[in-house]
Image (cartoon, grey):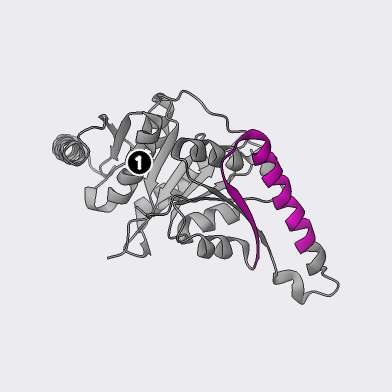
Amino acid sequence: MTASTTIAVGVDGTWADNGAVDWALHESELSAGPIRVLHVVDDRPRIRPYFDFAGACATAKQLVADVDAYLDERSAVPHTGVVLSGPPAQTLAGSTSTDRMLVVGRHGRGVFGRLLIGSTAEVVAYESETAVVVVPPKWTPGDPHAPVVVGVDELERCEAAVEFAVELAFERGAPIRLVHVWDVARMLTGDEAVDTVELAQLHHNQQVDRIVRRCREKYPDRIFAADLRRGHPVAGLIDAATAANGQLLVVGGRTHGRILAAVLGGTARGILHHATCPVAIVHQRKT
């Protein structure tokens, strides 16, 4: 992971309710890393008549000052505030590439009770070079001994996610739960379907055993548990995190500079939209 210890947190006018600042503060106290508070003034409306860019910047500075005051009241952790301008998602992603992580908040619930993620948070999660933690509204610390849950596939495609999960679990004194979700094509029927499922089950059992063995070899002082599930990856990972009362769900994002195609890209996006615990998107490092 990056050598930086700085925890960047993106804030907007909903910061008092969206959980990101509180999660960043909690992480800072665990890791002894400083906090960098960022707010981006969207400068694209400057092309419109009568847009008061100076006024928007003044409001932004006051917002960051309010967050600074909030942090001062609650902790002695070092922190700084920065106001930037530009397209919000791209600017946040581009300005935090050397930070240890970027924390952003997720919007509230829609009319059907489903958690909604803001477009800025989603774009940041995919474009950022650093790990992005998306925090649900009104987040508060839960069971400190609850596991950190991480979705795994082929180890070389999730190595960065596992490493991030191990780091945060170590800070918390928590175990790591490795979750692998698999399924087979539904168009198969009869004996062919039975044989295929049995072979797939055996293959994925062996795959998870290899991943757990390699993790224990690499991190001998950490506690790992495996959770193998059949079904849709989004539902499987969220159900696993919920069943374990996980304090964080970590999933992979890009691999080698591109968005993971098909199911893995869709998995990360689906989890961001539906998970009820904080979610970390960790991109595989470029080679």
The answer to whether residue 14 shows anywhere in this view is: no
Circle 1 residue = 167
Q: x and y percent of residue 123 in the render?
A: 53, 58
In depth, the one of 235 and 226 nearer the eye is 226
**Residue at horizontal 84 percent and vertical 75 percent from the top:** 49
Where 181 sits versus 9, above or below?
Answer: above
Is 203 situated above or below 175?
Answer: below
Q: Is residue 202 magenta?
A: no
What is the total number of numbered labels drawn onto the structure image?
1
Magenta part of the protein: which range? 57-85
User: Observer-nearest residue: 12 or 75?
Assistant: 75
Tell me residue 47's x, y (percent).
76, 76
Q: What is the x, y in percent for residue 139?
A: 58, 33
Q: Quadrant of the C terminus?
A: bottom left
| Dot 1: element | helix
Residue at 57 percent of width and 65 percent of height: 91
Q: Amino acid at mark 1?
A: Glu
Tell me the chief SS of the magenta region. Answer: helix
Using the rendered view, name the quadrant where residue 186 is placed.
Answer: top left
Q: Position of residue 10 (x, y in %)?
A: 60, 52
Whether residue 95 is situated above or below residue 187 in the rendered picture: below
